[in-house]
């Protein structure tokens, strides 16, 4: 899709990138216990004896978490495995009370799929590329460590311990930081459409482990490093840029890349080695003896399938078929929140073209000025539909609608009430308009003569004068018709 | 399959179990004895036999997604070697 090359002393280098994205599954309770997944609770309050790994506690899987992983798999056209199994990944760390993470190594619930990405999702002509997905598996999150509260101790909060994650593993099909960014954006959008993850990277609902290696174009794959827990799209792109350059510099100065785990430091904009985890890679996986295999039946799979919403690519195609421009269709479908808002607007009976133009120019413009997101919009789809309805049925003109919209944003009043109160109703009273036209023609006899002798451009002048005389409240189409008649 | 002393020391380290040199020597013999005993299973021909996941035919039980547990902070923290406010306190671990 994009030619990304790092220019070294020995020529150009190609970058090979694979992403492992951890996405928190949207659920009320944890993967194997009935504790809440709520964000921002008192430390260690959303913890059961299962999550704290007390002896004798047994895990019982949450059906919803498996369902969301399956739905996500279906949304990326992946192979769904009717038989999967949980394994234990053994390692010691203070945020992992069990001493192992319950995960799925050998038999993941979702197999191969793919995601089509575009470098600029708002540009319908931007080239696309398919990125392979190797697998999605379900696993437990760990607790949270805090290091800055005490001189000699770290503090542990197990509220996140046992929360369900999907690990979505891509093929090493990504070849530039921009493609990696596009992939993560598209994946996030799909997860939000499906409703399986809120995609909130600031709160840690989505984070990426980034595998990077470099090679001479078309050559053998190089040794890769894994940069852990990158929590924003921008940081991920910076981490890839830095890491690829570091590897090129290292190889060209006679060194060799070591397969290792690294951390990205956003303040210094660099990655560095996590040497302490050197033999942490020996996880001694084995099937979890506390859990039977996961077997999915036809009814379960069918429910997953029918509950899938229309996905971004399909929605975009439908919007174009409804007559929206390719650009509008692309912008409206890129983010789930925009698409859902627009759907709500259509559900109120608003015309698709009128609604999309208004949303993209008026509403986005206003939100932009206020520094708000669509979720925080002071005007909801129902209120917007009321305003657009008044334009559609000729009650107010487009320019008056802009004024009404501003008042709506300021006061929160409904459009009809504002039009009523301020007397903004457009008049279709031809008598009143004709009277004004007669006055204007009498006051501008010279211009009338010029117009009649062929100076067509003056028509706009008469429209403007009439509209001004009518205080903007006349139907522009009627003004046009009456003026044409009067001026002859 | 058998293990040597280096493997035993590695397993001990990964499991955070401190063992002396003499204990490691002893463990090499014990672990190899266990492995050899289990390896007798290799004598059985299991061609075409599905792996057994449970002795009694049983299905994995799934829960509904509801909050039914938690909110037991004092119980959870009761056995902690060090409690700091609402947290577990552990020796500082920092990357």
Image: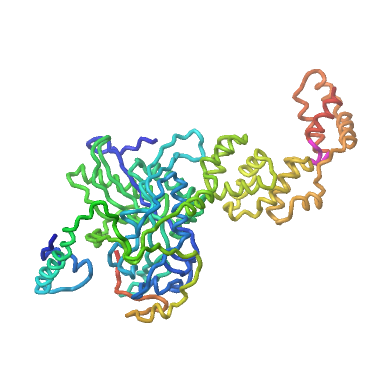
**In the image, residue A322 lies at what x, y percent?**
62, 36
Q: Main secondary structure of the magenta part?
A: loop
Residue A31 shows in the view: no
View extreme (top): residue: A453
Image height check: is B82 above or below A135?
A: below
Q: Quadrant of the C terminus of chain B?
A: bottom left
Residue A139 is drawn in which quadrant?
Answer: bottom left
Residue at horizontal 27 percent and vertical 42 percent from the top: A214
Tell whether A478 sits left or right of A39.
right
Residue extent of the magenta highlight: A470-475
* Magenta region includes residue A472: yes
Image height check: is B10 above or below A73?
A: below
Image height check: is B54 above or below A230?
A: below
* Magenta region includes residue A253: no
Tell whether A244 sits left or right of A418.
left
Residue A313 shows in the view: yes
Q: Quadrant of the N terminus of chain B?
A: bottom left
**In the image, residue A168 lies at what x, y percent?**
39, 51
Residue at horizontal 36 percent and vertical 68 percent from the top: A145
Image height check: is A329 above or below A109?
A: above
**In the image, residue B18 lies at what x, y percent?**
18, 73
**In the image, residue A31 lies at what x, y percent?**
42, 63
Residue at horizontal 80 percent and vertical 30 percent from the top: A480
- A364 vs A134, nearest the viewer: A134
- A83 vs A118, nearest the viewer: A83
Residue at horizontal 25 percent and vertical 43 percent from the top: A248
């Amino acid at each position: 899709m994009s030619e990304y090359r790092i220019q070294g002393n020995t020529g150009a280098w190609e970058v090979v990138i694979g992403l492992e994205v951890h996405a928190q599954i949207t659920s009320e309770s944890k993967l194997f216990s009935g504790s809440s997944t709520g964000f921002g609770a008192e430390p260690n309050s959303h913890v059961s004896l299962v999550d704290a790994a007390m002896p004798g506690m047994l895990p019982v899987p949450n059906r919803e978490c498996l369902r969301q992983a399956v739905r996500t798999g279906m949304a990326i056209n992946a192979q769904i495995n009717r038989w999967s199994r949980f394994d234990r990944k053994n390692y010691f760390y203070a945020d992992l009370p069990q001493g192992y993470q319950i995960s799925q190594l050998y038999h993941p619930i979702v197999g191969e799929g793919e995601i089509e990405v575009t470098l600029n999702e708002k540009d319908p002509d931007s080239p696309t590329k398919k990125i392979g997905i190797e697998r999605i598996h379900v696993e437990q999150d760990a607790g949270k460590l805090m290091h800055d509260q005490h001189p000699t101790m770290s503090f542990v909060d197990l509220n996140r311990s046992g929360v369900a994650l999907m690990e979505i593993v891509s093929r090493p099909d990504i070849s530039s930081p921009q493609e990696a960014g596009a992939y993560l954006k598209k994946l996030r959008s799909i997860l939000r459409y499906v409703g399986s993850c809120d995609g909130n990277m600031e709160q840690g609902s989505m984070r990426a482990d980034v595998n990077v290696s470099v090679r001479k174009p078309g050559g053998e794959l190089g040794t890769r490093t894994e940069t852990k827990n990158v929590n924003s799209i921008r940081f991920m792109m910076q981490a890839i840029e830095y890491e690829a350059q570091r590897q090129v510099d290292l190889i060209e100065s006679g060194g060799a890349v070591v397969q290792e785990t690294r951390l990205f430091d956003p303040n210094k904009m660099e990655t560095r080695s996590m040497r302490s985890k050197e033999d942490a890679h020996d996880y001694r996986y084995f099937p979890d003896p506390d859990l039977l295999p996961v077997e999915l039946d036809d009814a379960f799979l069918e429910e997953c399938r029918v509950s899938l919403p229309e996905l971004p690519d399909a929605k975009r195609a439908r919007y174009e078929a409804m007559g929206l421009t390719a650009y509008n269709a692309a912008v409206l479908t890129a983010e789930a929140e925009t698409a859902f808002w627009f759907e709500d607007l259509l559900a109120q009976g608003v015309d698709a073209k009128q609604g999309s133009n208004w949303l993209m120019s008026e509403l986005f413009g206003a939100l932009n000025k206020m520094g708000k997101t669509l979720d925080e919009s002071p005007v909801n789809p129902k209120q917007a539909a009321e305003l657009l309805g008044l334009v559609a049925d000729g009650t107010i003109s487009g320019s008056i609608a802009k004024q009404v919209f501003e008042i709506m944003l300021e006061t929160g009043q409904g459009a009809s009430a504002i039009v009523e109160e301020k007397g903004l109703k457009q008049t279709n009273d031809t008598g009143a308009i004709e009277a004004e036209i007669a006055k204007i023609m009498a006051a501008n006899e010279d211009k009338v003569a010029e117009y009649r002798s062929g100076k067509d451009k003056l028509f706009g002048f008469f429209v403007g004068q009439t509209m001004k005389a009518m205080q903007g409240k006349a139907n522009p189409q009627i003004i046009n018709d009456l003026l044409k008649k009067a001026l002859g | 399959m058998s293990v040597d002393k280096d493997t035993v020391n590695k397993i001990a380290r990964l499991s955070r179990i401190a063992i002396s040199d003499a204990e490691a020597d002893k463990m090499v013999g014990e672990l190899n004895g266990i492995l050899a005993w289990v390896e007798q299973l290799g004598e059985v021909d299991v061609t075409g036999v599905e792996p057994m996941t449970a002795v009694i035919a049983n299905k994995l039980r799934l829960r509904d997604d509801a909050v039914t547990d938690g909110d037991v902070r004092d119980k959870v923290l009761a056995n902690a070697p060090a409690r700091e406010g609402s947290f577990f306190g552990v020796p500082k671990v920092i990357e």
